[in-house]
Image: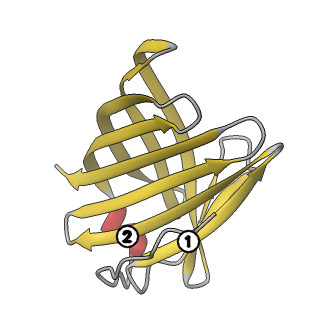
Amino acid sequence: MEEPAMHSGIPVPDPLAFLAGAWSTRRRLLDRRSGTTGTFTGITTFTPDDGGLRWDEEGTVHWASFQGPASRSYRIGAEGSGLTVTFPDGRVLCRLDLRSGTARDEHDCSPDTYRVDFTVTAGDAIDYSWDVTGPAKDHLLTTVLTRI
């Protein structure tokens, strides 16, 4: 499979300060095997929490198998020049270094692999995508965050 091209981004010298606040969230969902598409719209907040940020997302999903409210939470911690995003139970989701304005990482969630690409496109906008491939899933989730 061909890797998606990384786009140039806006450098972010202090990612915790940059992310802090509320963001409008628009996500496109694609199941490449079935051709099914869907959306998620809502609000993402990055709230200061114990030297890092709490990442909370709340909104509404419209997908063939589910329509209604959806939410999730993560924790972001500073690690050297980058960020570590963890699930509530402490497992690592991904590591991101946004100093250049772009970041890429992979997360193995057996039996599938989740590849994330982040691009800071403006001082008030972030594009990111999860490319999920493997025997169980073949999904592409593309998200646009716009500062509120």
| Label 1 residue SS | strand
Residue at which label 1 appears: 104
The one nearer the camera, 38 or 100, is 38
Q: Residue at x 29, y 41 (%)?
A: 26
Q: Quadrant of the N terminus?
A: bottom right
Q: Within the image, what quadrant is residue 85 found in?
A: bottom right
The one nearer the camera, 11 or 115, is 115
Q: Residue at x 78, y 40 (%)?
A: 135
Residue 92 spot, x, y in % from top left = 71, 56
Residue 146 spot, x, y in % from top left = 22, 53
- Crowd tier of the residue under label 2, counting other residues whose Cα lies within 10 Å: few below 14, some 14–19, many 20 or above: many
Left of 97 or right of it: where is 114?
A: right
Residue 60 spot, x, y in % from top left = 35, 22
| Label 2 residue SS | strand
Amino acid type, mark 2: Thr
Q: Residue at x 45, y 74 (%)?
A: 5
Answer with mark 2 or mark 1, whichever residue precedes in sequence. Answer: 1
The one nearer the camera, 106 or 32, is 32
- Crowd tier of the residue under label 1, counting other residues whose Cα lies within 10 Å: few below 14, some 14–19, many 20 or above: some
